Amino acid sequence: MVVVTAADTDAIQLWIIGAGPAGLALAAACVERGVRVGLLAPDPRASWHPNYAMWLDDAVSLGVEPYLGHRWIGARARFAAGSRDLDRGYGLLDDRRWQLELLAQVEGAGGSIVAGTLAAIEHDDNGVVLRCEGGERLRGQLVVDATGHGSRFVELEQGPRPAHQVAWGEQWVIEAGPGEPGLDLDRVNFMDWSSTGDAESDESLPPTFSYALPLARDRLFVEETVLAARLEHPPPSYFPALRERQRRRLELQGVRCVGEPVAVERCVIPMGAALPRGDQRTLAYGGAASMVHPATGYLLTNVLRRRARVADAIAAELERWVSPGGPSRRIWQAIWSPAEVRAWRLYGFGLEVICALDRPGVDRFFAAFFELPDHCWRGFVSGSAPTPELMVTMLRYFAGVPAPIRARLTAALFGREGLRLLRGLGGLQRS
Ligand SMILES: Cc1cc2nc3c(=O)[nH]c(=O)nc-3n(C[C@H](O)[C@H](O)[C@H](O)COP(=O)(O)OP(=O)(O)OC[C@H]3O[C@@H](n4cnc5c(N)ncnc54)[C@H](O)[C@@H]3O)c2cc1C
């Protein structure tokens, strides 16, 4: 750990709060552009907990393909009507290797990595002062909040409470009988909506699917997932029922698990959280800036896709710095371009529909979705489709879906969700 003195931190231009993937990825991009960066987190080198996965083509185009720990040539989705092979590679990051590389890049370029917990942000005529829980005061010109979902430092637009993705994941050693080949290592099970039997009706769970990554012939990571729901109870209270359903699913599928799981992952992701206001001086990135894809729960692709552009904007504003205020408003446009805000509201519309569907409905919804031409569903799940393409995808989808889903979409379009969509066409809210 770099020990940072008050004198060192005096020279810092940009403070990034949080050392998760969003904070570290942005910090590395900013130091590369010559910005004097300070990174503040309680334990900046602590390993990240989640298993981060993404589509292989996204990993290649976004520059993290060398950090993949596992890769698969394709994926599979399973519905009541049958299964569908998705010819799109998938990858799981070796996130510790990527994290250590980012830390080395930040330090190597002179960035300061500081252990501490932010208590409050004060903006003044010169820039920003950070008050830490230990009593330290740190000065800079700009601050980016990358403290993850539910940040207390960023002001969000008014909006409905977010839905949640909740999942219970386990990694198992799998037993294969003599002569059995073990797990198929070619494809991940991206979504398996098949039923786990009558016991489901006794479980108070929203619709769930199974997401499974074969890590070796005898090693499986599997996650029983509520894609998105407005939950009646606190998200962690659903974990026991998810675990139960997952174990039953494995048994039904004849997967023989040995002993106890070797690792457990508890996943709670707010989905469709309100967007940040674009007129505040505190900037945000990653979960704190509501960058999670509202209909899938993925975040990393957005963090990686925008980081060069945001780092460019930060470096340019610091270069021509006169006073605080204006720079932040302009940098917000790089964090959330108006086109991305429009696309996001469309994804949010999809989220509302998913939340309202029952189990057969959600099964039919995704079965129809993956019947769309490849480029349509690919752009949608990656969050990379430009708004006009997204509109075309949604219209095509609309034309092809079963009548009950079309009725639900129409009701949403002419209801509250449609209004929010229209109001948001101009970008982030500002005064
Ligand atoms: C189990 C799980 C699996 C996921 N899998 C994927 C996936 O496969 N692909 C994907 O794209 N997304 C995935 N996500 C979603 C999303 O990527 C994560 O939520 C991601 O970790 C968010 O990144 P972040 O950097 O914004 O915030 P975080 O990773 O939450 O990092 C926040 C940082 O801020 C620090 N911090 C917090 N408060 C303070 C404070 N007051 N002062 C200083 N520092 C502070 C924390 O210590 C931490 O360093 C997953 C999420 C979960 C929970």
Image (cartoon, rainbow, N blue to C red):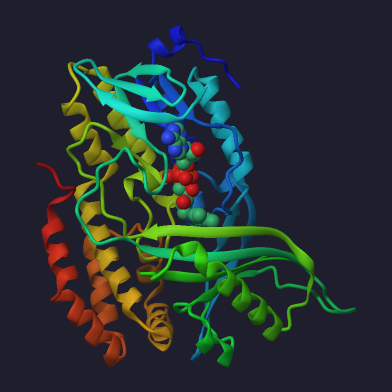
Inspect this view and state whether residue 305 appears: no
- Give me the residue at 49% from left, 17% from top: 110
Q: Quadrant of the C terminus?
A: top left
Q: Quadrant of residue 9?
A: top left
Q: Residue at x 29, y 86 (%)?
A: 405
Picture coordinates of residue 314 (x, y %)?
A: 30, 28
Q: Is residue 249 left or right of residue 125?
A: right
Q: Is residue 310 above or below residue 88?
A: above
Left or right: residue 17 compared with residue 52: left
Instruction: Residue at the far left: name it.
Output: 431
Q: Position of residue 257 (x, y in %)?
A: 77, 72
Image-quadrant location for residue 10: top left
Q: Please tell me which residue lies in front, 187 or 234.
A: 234
Looking at this rendering, what residue extends furthest in the top direction?
Answer: 7
In terms of depth relative to the viewer, which is nearer, 337 or 129? 129
Number of residue marks: 0
Task: Give percent across and percent down for residue 306.
Answer: 35, 43
Q: Residue at x 37, y 65 (%)?
A: 295
Nearer to us in this view, 146 or 379: 146
**Image quarter of residue 419:** bottom left
Rendered residue at 55%/63% (across/down): 89
